[in-house]
Amino acid sequence: IAGITQAPTSQILAAGRRMTLRCTQDMRHNAMYWYRQDLGLGLRLIHYSNTAGTTGKGEVPDGYSVSRANTDDFPLTLASAVPSQTSVYFCASSRTGDSNQPQHFGDGTRLSIL
Amino acid sequence: GQNIDQPTEMTATEGAIVQINCTYQTSGFNGLFWYQQHAGEAPTFLSYNVLDGLEEKGRFSSFLSRSKGYSYLLLKELQMKDSASYLCAVTDSGYALNFGKGTSLLVTP
């Protein structure tokens, strides 16, 4: 079944550690996104990529980095995790980066930083 | 920037009709989305409106008034499985979806 796969499903991480959240899609979508979802705050965009080789900053990019080496993969890295990065992280994709395109979401990664 | 407001919680009875409102203020507007998110799951796309009026898709309809910065999602013949959060999201001329905080709908027997 075509879709978006995120890994790991959940993770508990010590503060200060480096962590990469993986995201892979097989829909040949050009655009991909990373969001975090926190209680009372809703979904907030961290980084996005409109096509392979390009990335951009969203609303809350500090402490996170991304890369887009190919169409399918869009990993999110926390260089040195802090407790405020405890959240549920969703990866999403859309056919193009045009704002009228619906985004399709992965099942999320639940990350706890202790 | 974007300012998107939705009610935090709503309760409705199975078989009834419920309307979830969303108001927004934006410097530019290029469409409004509604997503459904069941607890512990991913958001899923429900509807997209860019022109004024009503879009109907089975039991779900979405309405937009650009001049009023207002949209609503109408759910008919409510079923227990409709208990979920409903997310309103607005796009401006950029690439990002800006989400409201969501409305948690509880459908009771």
Image: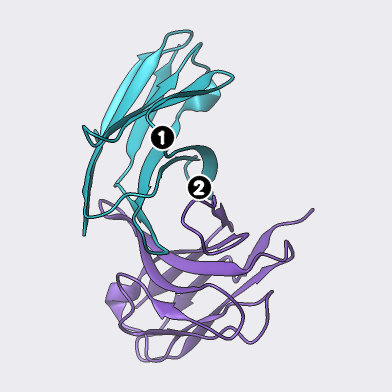
Chain colours: A purple, B cyan
In this view, the residue in front, A14 or B23, is B23
Give the side of residue A92 with respect to residue A36, left or right. right
On screen, residue B63 above or below A35: above
Q: Earlier in the sequence, mark 2 or mark 1?
A: 2
Residue A82 picture location, percent across and down:
31, 82
Q: Which element type, helix, strand or loop, lies under badge 1?
A: loop
Q: Residues within 10 Å of mark 2 (few under 14, many from 20)?
A: many
Quadrant the C terminus of chain A occupies: bottom left
Residue B42 picture location, percent across and down:
53, 50
Q: Quadrant of residue A94?
A: bottom right
* Mark number, residue B8: none
Q: What amino acid does circle 2 point to? A: Pro
Q: Quadrant of residue A28?
A: bottom right
Residue A51 picture location, percent across and down:
59, 76
Give the side of residue A58 with respect to residue A51, left or right. left
* Mark number, residue B51: 1
In this view, the residue in front, A37 or B40, is A37
On screen, residue B98 above or below A72: above
On screen, residue B75 above or below A48: above
In this view, the residue in front, B82 or B56, is B56
Mark 2 vs mark 1: in front: 1
* Mark number, residue B43: 2
Q: What amino acid does circle 1 point to? A: Leu
